[in-house]
Amino acid sequence: MNLLFLAIAPVTVVILYIYFKDKYEKEPIKILAISFFLGATVSIILTFTIGYIASSLVPITDTKSVSQQFIKAFFTVALVEEFSKYIIVRFYAQKNKEFNEPFDGIVYAVMVSMGFAALENILYTFQYGFVVGFTRAFTAVPAHATFGIIMGYFMGKAKFSNNRIKLNLLGLLFATLFHGSYDFFLFINFIPGIYIGAFVSLLIGVILSKKAISRHQNSSIFKV
């Protein structure tokens, strides 16, 4: 199987899923494409830059230290990556006139997340091969989707609320918490069986994501 197809396929499935879940007033393809592109470029650049600084300030000196892996998972990785996506949603998508209902927060946050996930997935798949690419199709890519949905749920509410700052930051916070939890259980793989926690975290994220999608669908101002 072509490795590029393997890397891109799960991202495409997520994008199409969210696009068709936007039932009542779909977003312009051009704006979606730009959001995806910004996620694959600007967010990645921000992640490498901020991540490098964070790693320098808080170096991991003991790979078998649970506390150090906790810091790495939640701060050096999760917060840095989700903040890099958040910036795009906050200062590009949320300011766009096409962002005109709460569900749009989910759509644009997922598009940015999938841009990020696409490039990340290509790099991992080409570096480590078919097995890693296949595994990530059912783990890392859906995980990035849930982080985007959770962030977008709150950022969608924020656009039309007087508590915009609070709700935007809640989106960043919860996306970071789920991302950090998922990574943490994978990072402490020196504890036998602990990786199961990552799948539990992902499952909870999927369940909450479906609820978030349903809530914003039902509250759409374009619903007849």
Image (tube, grey):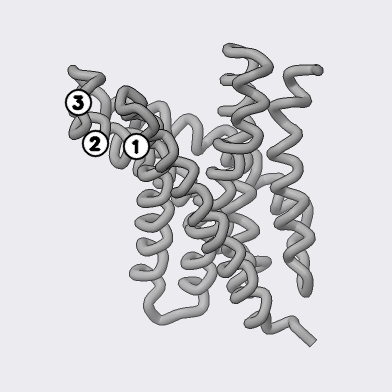
Q: Which residue is mark 3?
A: 65
Residue nearer the viewer, 133 or 96: 133
Mark 2 or mark 1: name the one nearer the start of the chain: 2
Q: Amino acid at mark 3?
A: Ser
Closer to the observer: label 2 or label 3?
3
Does residue 193 appear in the picture of this structure?
Answer: yes
Q: Is residue 36 left or right of residue 188?
A: right
What percent of the width, then of the height, locates residue 17?
A: 74, 54
State the SS at label 3.
loop
Q: Are marks 1 and 3 in contact (CB under 8 Å)?
A: no
Which image quadrant is residue 37 in? Answer: top right
At a point 56% along the width and 28% down the height, the residue shown is 120
What percent of the width, then of the height, locates residue 97?
A: 64, 68
Q: Amino acid at mark 2?
A: Ile
Looking at the image, residue 190 lies above or below residue 181: above
Circle on res. 218 = none
Q: Is residue 124 left or right of residue 76?
A: right
Residue nearer the viewer, 179 or 48: 179
What percent of the width, then of the height, locates residue 83?
A: 40, 46
State the SS at label 2.
helix
Circle on res. 184 = 1
At a point 77% along the width and 51% down the height, the residue shown is 16
